[in-house]
Image: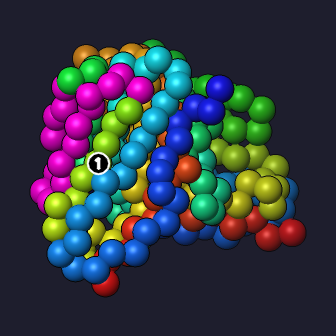
Amino acid sequence: QQQVKQSPQSLIVQKGGISIINCAYENTAFDYFPWYQQFPGKGPALLIAIRPDVSEKKEGRFTISFNKSAKQFSLHIMDSQPGDSATYFCAASSDTGNQFYFGTGTSLTVIP
Amino acid sequence: NAGVTQTPKFRVLKTGQSMTLLCAQDMNHEYMYWYRQDPGMGLRLIHYSVGEGTTAKGEVPDGYNVSRLKKQNFLLGLESAAPSQTSVYFCASTFLGGGLDTQYFGPGTRLTVL
């Protein structure tokens, strides 16, 4: 059973547009929600992360929105650039657990 | 500071052959993880370790074994490779467990089983 559900599977956005990727979870014990960015041939790298005590976290052009009651969180990429073309994974974990649970990934293509 | 390194980068095996993938980290991290990445399935945890000498099963442990004899190394073994084990394998490490710390990933090993 997929602990974290991610959509869409792929996304094509024009340069300058907004990219939005959504994730949902069921386990209310999760209290750490990171997003990872992966370029072809490379390992995933942490992009931005949020904890459920805040509803939004922004770092540059990247923003996580978090809805605790709906058990959903999303990544917004503002002013999307061709260099943002990559695969994005959401994940969830708990401070008392040892495992991270990943979504299935979203392949983002930003067209110049 | 090399971070997390993986050896080898690529490997082709025949069905039934065995091999060991090596993960090494120089960040003094306690926790280490092995994932496999398959198209449309994201990253799935195979095994993990919470410290030297410990190992635990993840989501998809069947057909794999691991060992953590030294804190900096985490080995993933395939005793009798099967085509279903064709995948990209990633190692990761963290200093603290769960959501208390960032996971750092290695560059991956692409394994093909014929």
Residue that appears at 22% across and 43% down? B66
Whether the magenta-drawn stretch holds residue B68 is answered as: yes
- Left or right, residue A102 beside residue B14: right
Which residue is at the far left? B62
In the image, residue B50 lies at what x, y percent? 27, 23
Q: Which residue is mark 1?
A: B76
Q: Nearer the viewer, residue B72 or A32?
A: B72
Residue that appears at 76% across and 46% down? A78
Quarter-of-image position of residue A26: top left
Image: B18 above or below A38: below
The chain containing the residue under callout 1 comes to B
Mark 1 packing: few (<14 Cα in 10 Å), some, or many (20+)? many
Query: Which secondary structure type mostly characterizes the magenta part of the structure?
Result: loop
- Left or right, residue B25 beside residue B38: right
Image quadrant containing the N terminus of chain A: bottom left
Image: A53 above or below B55: above
Kindly state the secondary structure of the residue where label 1 is placed. strand
- Left or right, residue B55 beside residue A103: left
Q: Nearer the viewer, residue B61 or B13?
A: B13
Image quadrant containing the C terminus of chain A: bottom right
Q: Which residues are magenta?
A: B54-72
User: The disc labelled 1 sits on which kind of residue?
Assistant: Leu
In the image, residue A24 lies at what x, y percent? 36, 45
Residue that appears at 57% across and 36% down? A46
